[in-house]
Amino acid sequence: MAQKPKFYVVWKGRKTGIFSSWEACAAQVQGFTGAQYKSFTSRRLAEQALRGKYAAHVGKPVSSGEWLFAPNPPVAESIAVDAACSGSPGRLEYRGVDLRSGEEVFRQGPYENGTNNVGEFLAIVHALAMLAGQGSTLPIYSDSDTAIAWVKAKRCNTKLATDGTNASLFELINRAEDWLAELKTVNPVLKWDTKAWGEIPADFNRK
Protein backbone atom coordinates (compact mmCIF):
# COMPACT_ATOMS: atom_id res chain seq x y z
CA MET A 1 0.00 0.00 0.00
CA ALA A 2 1.40 3.38 -0.97
CA GLN A 3 2.17 5.68 1.94
CA LYS A 4 -0.07 8.71 2.15
CA PRO A 5 1.76 11.98 1.45
CA LYS A 6 2.45 14.42 4.24
CA PHE A 7 3.05 18.13 4.21
CA TYR A 8 5.33 19.71 6.79
CA VAL A 9 4.74 23.19 8.17
CA VAL A 10 7.72 25.03 9.64
CA TRP A 11 6.75 28.04 11.74
CA LYS A 12 10.26 28.53 13.07
CA GLY A 13 13.41 27.23 11.40
CA ARG A 14 16.15 28.14 8.96
CA LYS A 15 13.37 28.68 6.42
CA THR A 16 9.65 28.77 7.15
CA GLY A 17 6.79 27.54 5.01
CA ILE A 18 5.38 24.24 3.72
CA PHE A 19 7.62 21.36 2.67
CA SER A 20 6.46 18.23 0.86
CA SER A 21 9.05 15.83 2.29
CA TRP A 22 10.56 15.10 5.67
CA GLU A 23 14.05 15.54 4.22
CA ALA A 24 13.24 19.11 3.12
CA CYS A 25 11.64 19.87 6.49
CA ALA A 26 14.51 18.32 8.45
CA ALA A 27 16.99 20.55 6.68
CA GLN A 28 15.19 23.55 8.20
CA VAL A 29 14.65 22.30 11.74
CA GLN A 30 17.28 19.76 12.78
CA GLY A 31 19.85 21.46 14.98
CA PHE A 32 17.83 24.69 14.99
CA THR A 33 17.13 25.81 18.56
CA GLY A 34 13.42 26.20 19.30
CA ALA A 35 12.29 24.86 15.92
CA GLN A 36 8.51 24.69 15.46
CA TYR A 37 7.12 22.26 12.90
CA LYS A 38 4.40 19.66 12.36
CA SER A 39 3.14 17.31 9.64
CA PHE A 40 -0.33 17.43 8.06
CA THR A 41 -2.25 15.06 5.82
CA SER A 42 -3.13 17.57 3.09
CA ARG A 43 -1.72 20.76 1.63
CA ARG A 44 -4.83 22.78 2.44
CA LEU A 45 -4.59 21.76 6.11
CA ALA A 46 -0.93 22.78 6.05
CA GLU A 47 -1.76 26.12 4.42
CA GLN A 48 -4.41 26.84 7.03
CA ALA A 49 -2.03 25.87 9.84
CA LEU A 50 0.75 28.10 8.52
CA ARG A 51 -1.59 31.10 8.73
CA GLY A 52 -2.06 30.37 12.42
CA LYS A 53 0.25 29.68 15.32
CA TYR A 54 2.24 26.57 16.19
CA ALA A 55 0.68 26.48 19.68
CA ALA A 56 -2.74 25.79 18.14
CA HIS A 57 -1.50 22.52 16.62
CA VAL A 58 1.20 21.06 18.83
CA GLY A 59 0.15 17.83 20.53
CA LYS A 60 -2.83 17.20 18.26
CA PRO A 61 -3.08 14.25 15.84
CA VAL A 62 -2.28 14.89 12.20
CA SER A 63 -5.82 13.79 11.26
CA SER A 64 -7.29 16.72 13.19
CA GLY A 65 -9.08 19.26 11.02
CA GLU A 66 -10.08 17.34 7.88
CA TRP A 67 -13.74 17.98 8.69
CA LEU A 68 -13.25 21.72 8.24
CA PHE A 69 -13.15 21.30 4.46
CA ALA A 70 -16.09 18.92 4.04
CA PRO A 71 -19.05 20.11 1.92
CA ASN A 72 -21.39 19.11 4.76
CA PRO A 73 -19.26 19.37 7.90
CA PRO A 74 -20.25 18.21 11.39
CA VAL A 75 -21.61 20.61 13.98
CA ALA A 76 -18.52 22.48 15.17
CA GLU A 77 -19.92 23.14 18.65
CA SER A 78 -19.88 19.52 19.79
CA ILE A 79 -17.93 16.82 21.62
CA ALA A 80 -16.19 13.96 19.76
CA VAL A 81 -15.43 10.73 21.62
CA ASP A 82 -13.36 7.65 20.87
CA ALA A 83 -11.69 4.66 22.51
CA ALA A 84 -8.50 2.70 22.00
CA CYS A 85 -7.95 -0.92 23.03
CA SER A 86 -4.67 -2.83 22.79
CA GLY A 87 -6.03 -6.28 21.94
CA SER A 88 -9.53 -7.66 22.24
CA PRO A 89 -9.89 -7.92 25.12
CA GLY A 90 -7.02 -5.70 26.14
CA ARG A 91 -5.96 -2.49 27.84
CA LEU A 92 -8.64 0.13 27.24
CA GLU A 93 -8.74 3.94 27.26
CA TYR A 94 -11.37 6.42 26.12
CA ARG A 95 -11.58 10.19 25.80
CA GLY A 96 -13.59 13.19 24.65
CA VAL A 97 -12.43 16.19 22.62
CA ASP A 98 -13.98 19.60 22.02
CA LEU A 99 -14.43 19.53 18.24
CA ARG A 100 -13.91 23.24 17.59
CA SER A 101 -10.78 23.69 19.69
CA GLY A 102 -9.36 20.17 19.55
CA GLU A 103 -8.82 20.31 23.31
CA GLU A 104 -9.19 17.09 25.30
CA VAL A 105 -12.02 17.50 27.81
CA PHE A 106 -11.76 14.10 29.51
CA ARG A 107 -9.69 10.91 29.40
CA GLN A 108 -10.25 7.69 31.34
CA GLY A 109 -8.17 4.56 31.73
CA PRO A 110 -6.31 2.46 31.13
CA TYR A 111 -8.58 -0.37 32.22
CA GLU A 112 -7.49 -3.97 31.90
CA ASN A 113 -9.32 -6.61 29.87
CA GLY A 114 -11.77 -4.37 28.01
CA THR A 115 -12.98 -4.02 24.43
CA ASN A 116 -13.20 -1.12 22.04
CA ASN A 117 -17.01 -1.24 21.93
CA VAL A 118 -17.19 -1.01 25.71
CA GLY A 119 -14.85 1.97 25.63
CA GLU A 120 -16.88 3.69 22.92
CA PHE A 121 -20.07 3.15 24.94
CA LEU A 122 -18.53 4.51 28.14
CA ALA A 123 -17.08 7.49 26.27
CA ILE A 124 -20.52 8.52 25.01
CA VAL A 125 -22.09 8.13 28.45
CA HIS A 126 -19.23 10.07 30.05
CA ALA A 127 -19.79 12.91 27.56
CA LEU A 128 -23.54 12.86 28.17
CA ALA A 129 -23.02 13.06 31.93
CA MET A 130 -20.46 15.84 31.60
CA LEU A 131 -22.74 17.92 29.38
CA ALA A 132 -25.76 17.25 31.60
CA GLY A 133 -23.79 18.58 34.56
CA GLN A 134 -23.04 21.72 32.57
CA GLY A 135 -26.63 22.14 31.43
CA SER A 136 -25.35 21.89 27.86
CA THR A 137 -27.30 20.62 24.84
CA LEU A 138 -24.25 20.12 22.60
CA PRO A 139 -24.30 17.05 20.34
CA ILE A 140 -21.86 14.18 20.73
CA TYR A 141 -20.12 12.43 17.84
CA SER A 142 -18.95 8.80 17.86
CA ASP A 143 -17.67 6.70 14.96
CA SER A 144 -19.13 3.52 16.50
CA ASP A 145 -22.56 2.37 15.29
CA THR A 146 -22.49 -0.33 17.99
CA ALA A 147 -21.85 2.06 20.86
CA ILE A 148 -24.50 4.51 19.64
CA ALA A 149 -27.03 1.66 19.47
CA TRP A 150 -26.12 0.52 22.99
CA VAL A 151 -26.57 4.03 24.37
CA LYS A 152 -29.95 4.39 22.68
CA ALA A 153 -30.97 1.02 24.16
CA LYS A 154 -29.53 2.16 27.53
CA ARG A 155 -27.65 -1.12 27.81
CA CYS A 156 -24.04 -2.16 27.21
CA ASN A 157 -24.71 -5.36 25.29
CA THR A 158 -21.18 -6.69 25.57
CA LYS A 159 -20.22 -10.36 25.64
CA LEU A 160 -17.06 -9.53 27.57
CA ALA A 161 -16.61 -11.80 30.57
CA THR A 162 -16.03 -10.26 33.97
CA ASP A 163 -13.11 -11.42 36.11
CA GLY A 164 -10.79 -10.03 38.73
CA THR A 165 -8.85 -7.94 36.22
CA ASN A 166 -11.76 -5.86 34.92
CA ALA A 167 -14.02 -5.49 37.94
CA SER A 168 -13.58 -1.69 37.91
CA LEU A 169 -14.60 -1.61 34.24
CA PHE A 170 -17.82 -3.51 34.92
CA GLU A 171 -18.52 -1.19 37.83
CA LEU A 172 -18.37 1.70 35.35
CA ILE A 173 -20.65 -0.17 32.94
CA ASN A 174 -23.23 -0.79 35.68
CA ARG A 175 -23.12 2.85 36.79
CA ALA A 176 -23.49 4.00 33.18
CA GLU A 177 -26.53 1.79 32.59
CA ASP A 178 -28.16 2.93 35.84
CA TRP A 179 -27.53 6.58 34.92
CA LEU A 180 -28.96 6.11 31.42
CA ALA A 181 -32.06 4.46 32.87
CA GLU A 182 -32.81 7.65 34.81
CA LEU A 183 -31.92 10.05 32.00
CA LYS A 184 -34.91 12.02 30.74
CA THR A 185 -33.38 14.25 28.07
CA VAL A 186 -30.50 13.18 25.87
CA ASN A 187 -28.10 15.31 23.84
CA PRO A 188 -28.03 14.26 20.18
CA VAL A 189 -25.63 11.33 19.74
CA LEU A 190 -24.52 11.43 16.11
CA LYS A 191 -22.47 9.19 13.84
CA TRP A 192 -19.12 10.60 12.76
CA ASP A 193 -18.75 10.24 8.97
CA THR A 194 -15.16 9.05 8.72
CA LYS A 195 -15.27 8.79 4.95
CA ALA A 196 -16.32 12.42 4.51
CA TRP A 197 -14.58 14.01 7.50
CA GLY A 198 -11.46 11.94 8.17
CA GLU A 199 -10.60 10.29 11.47
CA ILE A 200 -12.63 11.50 14.41
CA PRO A 201 -10.56 14.11 16.31
CA ALA A 202 -10.81 12.07 19.53
CA ASP A 203 -8.93 9.24 17.81
CA PHE A 204 -5.87 8.11 19.75
CA ASN A 205 -3.80 8.12 16.53
CA ARG A 206 -2.37 4.64 17.16
CA LYS A 207 -3.36 2.93 13.90
Image (cartoon, rainbow, N blue to C red):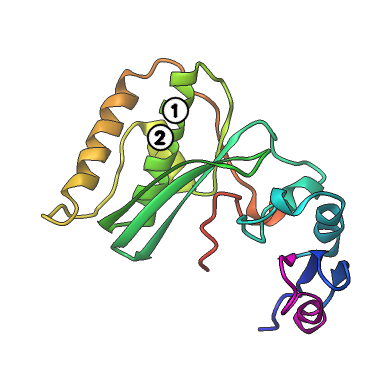
Amino acid found under the numbered disc labelled 2? His
Under tag 2, what secondary structure?
A: helix
Q: Is 171 placed left or right of 19 in the picture?
A: left
Q: Where is residue 143 drawn, in percent x and y?
A: 54, 49
The label on residue 24 is none
Asked where in the image residue 173 lies, by quadrant, the reply is: top left
- In this view, the residue in front, 164 or 23, is 23
At 66% from the left edge and 31% from the top edge, which residue is drawn?
77
| Farthest residue, direction front | 33
Please name the residue that numbered disc 2 is placed on.
126
Residue 85 locus on image (x, y percent) = 38, 61
Of residues 182 and 137, the one nearer the viewer is 137
Which residues are the magenta region?
21-39
Q: Position of residue 74 (x, y in %)?
A: 70, 39
Q: Quadrant of the N terminus?
A: bottom right
Q: Residue 121 vs residue 70: left or right?
A: left
Q: Residue at x 81, y 69 (%)?
A: 13
Question: Which secondary structure, mark 1?
Answer: helix
- CB under 8 Å between discs 2 and 1: yes
Crowdedness near tag 2: few (<14), some (14–19) or many (≥20) residues, C-alpha within 10 Å: many
Q: What amino acid type is highlighted by mark number 1? A: Met
Q: Is residue 35 magenta?
A: yes
